[in-house]
Image (cartoon, helix red, strand yellow):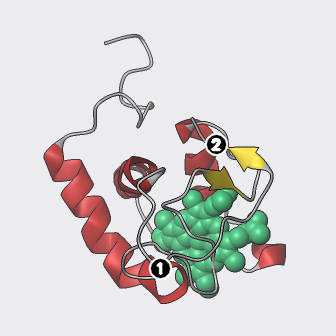
């Protein structure tokens, strides 16, 4: 654990965090991203492509917290406490490169690690 432990969702999230993230994702995000995060209005979150600047988990967290309002992605920092944003980030981050079947074709020019 480094000095920034707890602010780095990519550092081995707990099963409880992932489960919590999945629950909130089903409630609040699936309407646009699909229940399997395969992409509907919003992009597929299970491919290796990123439409925004997002390259690392910290960038993903910023997209989730602040949103991209001009492009239809709401910001969630006013809705959720920080630990829930962390859990959502851990969950969504864990889905990248899992390539849900029948998912929306990749969008964006950035590649996720
Ligand atoms: C009203 C529809 C909508 C909802 C609800 C929504 N999103 Fe999004 N989301 C989008 C759109 C549209 C984009 C693409 C934004 C862009 O073009 O930059 C996006 C982008 C993203 C990205 C960046 C993807 C990339 O390829 O860079 C992440 C991560 C994300 N959303 C996570 C979430 C999470 C987590 C939630 C729930 C807390 C959520 N979204 C809820 C519409 C939505």
Image coordinates of residue 73 in percent, x first then y, are 67, 74
Establish whether ligand 1 lies closer than 8 Å to the Cβ of label 1: no
Quadrant where the C terminus sits is top right
Name the residue furthest left. Answer: 16
Q: Nearer the viewer, residue 27 or 110?
A: 110
Quadrant where the N terminus sits is top left
Residue 73 visible in the snapshot: no
Classify mark 1: helix, strand or loop. Answer: loop
Mark 2 vs mark 1, foreground winner is 1
Classify mark 2: helix, strand or loop. Answer: helix
Q: Does 42 appear above or below 94?
A: below
Q: Which residue is mark 1?
A: 102
Q: Nearer the viewer, residue 103 or 72?
A: 103
Residue 61 visible in the snapshot: yes
Q: Indicate which quadrant contains ligand 1.
A: bottom right
Q: CA distance from mark 2 to mark 1?
A: 26 Å
Name the residue furthest top. Answer: 2
Image coordinates of residue 48 in percent, x first then y, are 58, 50
Based on the displayed image, in which of its 4 quarters is residue 26 positioned? bottom left
Q: Is residue 59 found left or right of 8 in the rendered image?
A: right
Q: Is residue 24 found left or right of 104 in the rendered image?
A: left
Q: Residue placed at 36% from the left, 57% from the top?
A: 84
Q: Which mark is residue 59?
A: 2
Q: Residue placed at 35% from the left, 54% from the top?
A: 91
Q: Which mark is residue 113?
A: none
Image coordinates of residue 69 in percent, x first then y, are 77, 74
* Mark 1 neighbour class, 10 Å CA radius: few under 14, some 14 to 19, many 20 or more: few
Q: Residue placed at 41% from the left, 73% from the top?
A: 101
């Amino acid at each position: 654990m480094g000095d920034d432990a707890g602010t780095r969702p990519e550092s081995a999230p707990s099963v409880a965090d992932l489960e919590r993230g999945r629950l909130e994702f089903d409630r609040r995000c699936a309407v646009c991203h699909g229940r399997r995060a395969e992409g509907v209005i919003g992009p597929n979150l299970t491919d290796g492509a990123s439409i925004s600047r997002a390259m690392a988990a910290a960038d993903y967290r910023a997209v989730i917290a602040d949103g991209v309002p001009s492009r239809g992605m709401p910001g969630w920092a006013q809705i959720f406490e920080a630990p829930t944003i962390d859990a959502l980030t851990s969950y969504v981050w864990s889905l990248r490169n899992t390539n849900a079947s029948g998912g929306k074709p990749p969008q964006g020019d950035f590649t996720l690690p």
